[in-house]
Image (cartoon, rainbow, N blue to C red):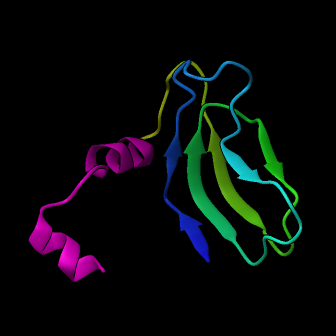
């Protein structure tokens, strides 16, 4: 499984330290996380063969252009577009 080009923003909704990545047990396996952006470095990755690459941690809301583009394109898509993507 691949997780790629995602943005996670703490946004102050967590009661404690938010984890941008939460792979909590070794029975979770073969998840590759690449080209993601986050404003917190807190994570839990205890998975098996779950590498991370090219993870950008930002501060003070200074999101790079690529992260801004991902955020602008996020959200529900019209039905016709969903059918093509599925």
From what the image shows, is residue 52 above or below residue 22? below
- Where residue 37 appears, as percent x and y from the top left, is 56, 45
**Quarter containing the C terminus:** bottom left
Residue 60, quarter of the rendered image: top right
- Where residue 51 appears, as percent x and y from the top left, is 78, 67
From what the image shows, is residue 30 above or below residue 75? below
Residue at (53% x, 33% y) in the render:
9
The number of numbered badges drawn on the structure is 0
From what the image shows, is residue 26 above or below residue 43? below
Pick the front one: 14 or 36: 14
Query: Is 70 inside the magenta-drawn segment?
Result: yes
- Where residue 44 appears, as percent x and y from the top left, is 81, 47
Pick the front one: 34 or 24: 24
Pick the front one: 28 or 4: 28
Pick the front one: 86 or 33: 86
Residue at (71% x, 38% y) in the render:
19
Left/right of residue 1 with respect to residue 25 in the rendered view:
left
Left/right of residue 62 with respect to residue 50 in the rendered view:
left
Residue 39, quarter of the rendered image: top right
Residue at (41% x, 49% y) in the render:
66
From what the image shows, is residue 46 above or below residue 15? below
Kindly report the secondary structure that dominates the magenta region of the rendered protein: helix
- Where residue 62 appears, as percent x and y from the top left, is 49, 26
Residue at (62% x, 23% y) in the render:
14
Residue 46, quarter of the rendered image: bottom right
**Which residues make up the magenta segment?**
65-86
**Quarter containing the N terminus:** bottom right
């Amino acid at each position: 499984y691949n997780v790629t080009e995602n943005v996670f923003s703490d946004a102050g909704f967590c009661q404690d330290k938010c984890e941008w990545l939460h792979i909590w047990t070794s029975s979770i396996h073969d998840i590759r996380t690449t080209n993601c952006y986050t404003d917190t470095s807190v994570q839990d990755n205890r998975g098996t063969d779950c590498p991370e690459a090219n993870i950008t941690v930002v501060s003070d809301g200074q999101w790079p252009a690529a992260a801004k583009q991902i955020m602008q394109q996020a959200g529900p898509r019209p039905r016709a577009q969903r059918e093509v993507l599925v």
